[in-house]
Amino acid sequence: MLSVKTTFEVNALFKIYKSLFDKHHDTCFALDLEGNFILFNDAAVKLTGYSAEEALQMSLITFIADDSLKKTLRYFDLVLQGNRESFNTAIQHKNGKDVLLSVTFIPINIDNHICGIVAVAKEMIKTKNDEHVFLGQNNVLEMVVRGCPFKEVLEEIVYFVEKALDEGQCSLHLVNEKATSLKLGTAPNVPADFHDQIQNIPIGPKEGSCGTAAYFNRLIIVSDIANDPLWKKTKHAALKHKIEACWSSPICNNQQKVLGVYSIYYDLPYIPTERDKQVIREATYLTSLVIQHYLADEKLNFLTNHDELTGLANRRLFDEKVNIAIKFFKKEEGKLLGVLYFDLDRFKRINDYLGHNVGDQLLKKVAERIQGCVRNNDLVSRQGNDEFTILLDHVTNHEVSQISKRISDKFALPFIIDGHEVYVTPSIGISLFPSDGKNADELITKADMAMNQAKKYGRNNFQFYNPNLEKHNFDRLDIENELRKAIEKNEFILHYQPIIDLSANRITGVEALIRWEHPHRGKISPDYFIPVAEETGMIIPIGEIVLKKACVQMKKWQDSGFFLSTISVNISIRQFFQPNLVPMIAQIIKDTAIDPASLTIEITESMTMDVETATTILHDLKGLGVNISIDDFGTGYSSLSYLKKFPIDYLKIDRSFINDIAKSKDDENIATTILLMAHNLGLSVIAEGVETSEQLGILRQHRCNEAQGFLFSKPLPENDLKHLLNNLPVSFFNQRR
């Protein structure tokens, strides 16, 4: 310590060093073992403002600034033990201003006996520490430009700051996604055993230097960990690793949002100098730029490869991953790559009726539900709109089927969105590598074909690709072209399915159903061309054609003496929301001179999701004098409360509930509930798809008003229906009682 005294041969020392001291351009001075100045050169005079005579009457202690004293004395003791030490400190100029110095202390050893200390000092403005900061900043910026890994750049910042601050050890923490804690970014020189203590630091007002700095968004200086309440929880661990001081500075973005925390640890109690604070400010600013750059880069990369709405992989990333999986596919008996392609049945209706906001929420929930159905190593992608794909790597054919079924089963449950129970089902197409394609594009195309086949089989199922599908796919393109010609050439005809009044036991009406008689292909099923018409918008002119033909035919029957109360015509969703729907129907009624009361307009339940719009349209239709029927009732998506608001005449129980009404108590209960509710509301009920006497018996038992189905008659062309009406046997109804 400075209190130690020893004899010093001043004359010998002067001979050795005086010439060096006097002529050296850097600040040089010598101290005895008590810390008193014994040599003081001209550069030292210039730096401190004290003359040599004044300085030689003073000690080092009187020169050192208060906040650097403890640190300087520590190095003084180390040098007296024979060590050479370099460090930063601050002295007080004669004018009262602090001067920052970079100092090297060297022991004076004569005959193996330390007699004092010689020191060389430079003002910090001229030191290599500033060069460290400058060069370090340049290195960091070059690394960012080169695209070096984020952690490597953070470590480079730590390294140059540690050099600039001499003996401090640094750590960089990053705020987690929920902004509740700080995760360790890097701390290469902080004792490894201490990393557990700083791995995840809560953000709060009393969570050490780091957590508190992030909480208050300001520099937190803990100069003495042993006695500071902020470190109460972890001070023992810190002191065990000789960490006695910690300064933490928040790293903020341009909007002052905390991104992380920069911390410097010292192995003795220490208050930062103005120089230290300046280095910290420069380090946190540079770190902020780096973090913001990598966050922006990460976001850009994410958006390039992911769907912004759902967070799933996008088509670009999916194609890339499929091709990579193909490249590294290892042949193993029974193992394949599977690509699933599916969309959401009737999703457009949900968007149209409940709005795009509900549609977007639904897509997010769909994405979550899909991910819950696949394995951890499978990749789920959103291709666009309501279309999704899944890559199943290294699976068996059976496993592909299991996963596809699991998805279908999960979608049987409703999605709850803004109080709405929304039901959607997936139609899934599957292709397999290596049998169905050699790259992503081929596999996705084949899976898409298989999906269309699934839709053809009634939706809400999965189908594997079959080579025969390609022919059907080309047929679809042909159908679209031929459909346009069919509208121009009026190739559509109507078939009529009788509707039976179950109490009067007579045919009271018919439902008009479209058929296409192609001049070369013959009869084309509505199941095949109606979806094409809906997708292309051709359903609008086709719907108008059907309505005109139906009204013309009804007028013809009435004029010929056939007593039919009504003819029912289905309106498509696109037609329903056309602005000219009501004027168009009014004009057809006028042109055909049909009694409006003999025309029934059928809409599906799902068309009424947008209650306000549907109410307006239905009241306008009712104003024409027509009847209104809700088709496929029981399969829709909206509240039953609309039944009291809409001017409805009939409800049609969907055939899916009639099919097993004699076998399934659940289906019978649904059907009877609809009947009871409709009767209480003063509505008539029509059961469609009646095929057995058992079904009819149950419907009669529960007072169903009307029915149609193959039990009575399939849809018939005009002449066959006329023949049926003219030759209807008495037993036609009795045998079906």
Image (cartoon, rainbow, N blue to C red):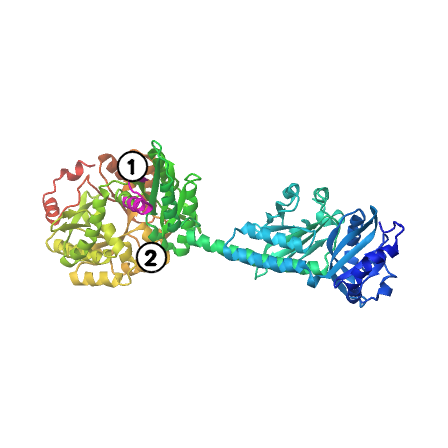
Q: Nearer the viewer, residue 517 or 471?
A: 471
In depth, the one of 391 and 563 nearer the eye is 391
Residue 488 among those drawn in magenta: no
N-term mark: 1 or 2 = 2
Q: Residue at x 36, y 54 (%)?
A: 351
Verify whether residue 438 appears in magenta: yes
- The answer to whether 416 is drawn above or below residue 145 in the figure is above
Q: x, y percentage for residue 473?
A: 23, 47
The percent coordinates of residue 186 (x first, y second) are: 60, 48
- Work out whether 26 lies above or below 336: below
Q: Residue at x 27, y 59 (%)?
A: 621
Q: Position of residue 95 (x, y in %)?
A: 80, 68
Task: State which region is magenta.
Answer: 432-449
* Residue 671: numbered disc: none
Residue under label 1: 661
Which disc is residue 614 wearing?
A: 2
Q: Of the residues shown, which amino acid type is indicated by label 1?
A: Ile
Looking at the rendered structure, the kind of residue marked 2 is Ala
Label 1 crowd (10 A; few <14 / some 14-19 / many >=20):
many
Coordinates of residue 72 in the picture (x, y in percent): 78, 54
Q: Alpha carbon of mark 1 to alpha carbon of mark 2: how far? A: 31 Å
